[in-house]
Amino acid sequence: QQQPMSRACKHAKRIAAAGRRNLDEALDIFWNARSPSNAACAAAVTACSKGTAWQRGVALLESFVAERHSGTIIEAVLLNAGLGAAAAGAAWQHALDFMQRAAPGRHDVSSYTAAMTALAKSAKWRQGLQLLRQMEEAHIDLDLPATLVAMRLQGMAG
């Protein structure tokens, strides 16, 4: 039997659905919540990164994290949403900043892949390969998207 969906989860789902139709509607749903959850913030940031509004997604994540978590990105869902927005805009500085500000143990293969993608899009292959080494040191296995980005970075290195 399936567990009932929490209010936070329903809210995040509404934001994600609205984001597929209209970004401003999704952001209105997020900002009008009494106490938006980490999942709701991640859904709103992801909605921003799907279009050309990745900068709005980064700004939203920054304000949410500053207000709720003293600037530390405490959950992988927030980290990966922010990194996805950074990758969408090839904003390598934001990607590296988010990786550094993440709480210990929050990096996963998706985190590294998104950060390396932002670096590859910006031709910052040295930093991308450094993240690849950090990923290996953390014993995080590469999946197909991570392998493709790693190959791209290695190709850029010559």
Image (cartoon, rainbow, N blue to C red):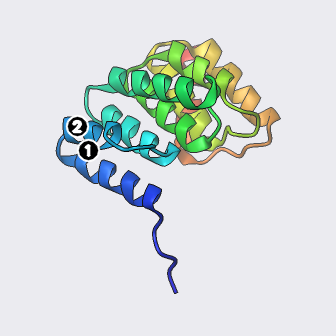
| Disc 2 target residue | 23
| Disc 1 target residue | 19
Residue drawn at (45%, 17%) of the image: 91
Q: Is residue 140 visible?
A: yes
- Whole-percent x and y of residue 13? 36, 56
Q: Are marks 2 and 1 in contact (CB under 8 Å)?
A: yes
Horizontally, residue 57 falls left or right of residue 79, namely: left
Residue type (three-letter) at the residue carrying disc 2: Leu
Residue drawn at (39%, 60%) of the image: 10
- Whole-percent x and y of residue 150? 59, 31
User: Which of 47 and 96 lies nearest the eye of the viewer?
Assistant: 47
Total marks placed: 2
Tag 2 secondary structure: helix
Q: Is residue 158 visible?
A: no
User: Which of 82 and 109 lies nearest the eye of the viewer?
Assistant: 82
Residue type (three-letter) at the residue carrying disc 1: Gly
Pointer 1 local density, CA inside 10 Å: few below 14, some 14–19, many at least 20: many
Residue drawn at (63%, 42%) of the image: 109
- Whole-percent x and y of residue 17? 27, 53
